[in-house]
Image (cartoon, grey):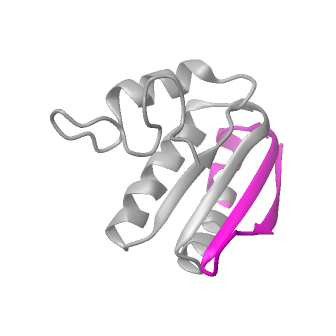
């Protein structure tokens, strides 16, 4: 089970959500509601994944979906840190992206080596 806590961002309109535990399909619905709420209340939402022990493909896909919806609403979703396990799901999404454009990499996951640096 993944747990989280809200932390203030460095600037006004920014929020960090530190996650820990196992992020998997059984919680996607609850997490989606919470992440949508948080993203709606700030300009920049950073998800700190460094405390996540495992992340599955459904959670990765949720992050891609929220990233795209945030972009369309003028918001920004950022990732910080990598989960201990779940690299295979991340590798696929980095290569394919949720809304990849020709000659453009995934803007959420960044380069194949990991999330964009903060």
Which portion, as a residue range, is magenta? 1-30
Viewer-proximal residue, 83 or 114?
A: 114
**Residue at 63% across, 50% down:** 28
Point out the residue furthest to the top here: 88
Picture layout, residue 63 above or below residue 37: above
Q: Quadrant of the N terminus?
A: top right
**Residue at 56% across, 42% down:** 117
Assess whether residue 15 is covered by the magenta stretch.
Answer: yes
Q: Is residue 110 left or right of residue 79?
A: left
x, y (%) of residue 3? Answer: 84, 51
Q: Quadrant of residue 58?
A: top right
**Count of picture labels:** 0
**Residue at 76% across, 38% down:** 50
Assess whether residue 25 is covered by the magenta stretch.
Answer: yes
x, y (%) of residue 80? Answer: 65, 45
Picture layout, residue 86 above or below residue 33: above
x, y (%) of residue 44? Answer: 55, 68
Picture layout, residue 7 above or below residue 50: below
x, y (%) of residue 105? Answer: 31, 35
Q: Is residue 97 left or right of residue 86?
A: left
Q: Is residue 78 left or right of residue 101?
A: right
């Amino acid at each position: 089970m993944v747990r989280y806590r809200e932390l203030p961002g460095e600037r006004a309109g920014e929020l960090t959500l530190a996650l820990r535990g196992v992020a998997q399909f059984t919680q996607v619905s609850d997490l989606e509601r919470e992440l949508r709420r948080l993203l709606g209340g700030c300009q920049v939402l950073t998800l700190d994944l460094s405390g996540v022990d495992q992340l599955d493909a459904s959670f990765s896909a949720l992050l891609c979906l929220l990233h795209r919806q945030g972009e369309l609403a003028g918001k920004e979703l950022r990732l910080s840190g990598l989960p201990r396990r779940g690299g295979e799901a991340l590798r696929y999404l980095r290569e394919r992206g949720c809304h990849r454009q020709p000659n453009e990499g995934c803007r959420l996951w960044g380069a194949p080596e990991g999330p964009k640096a903060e």
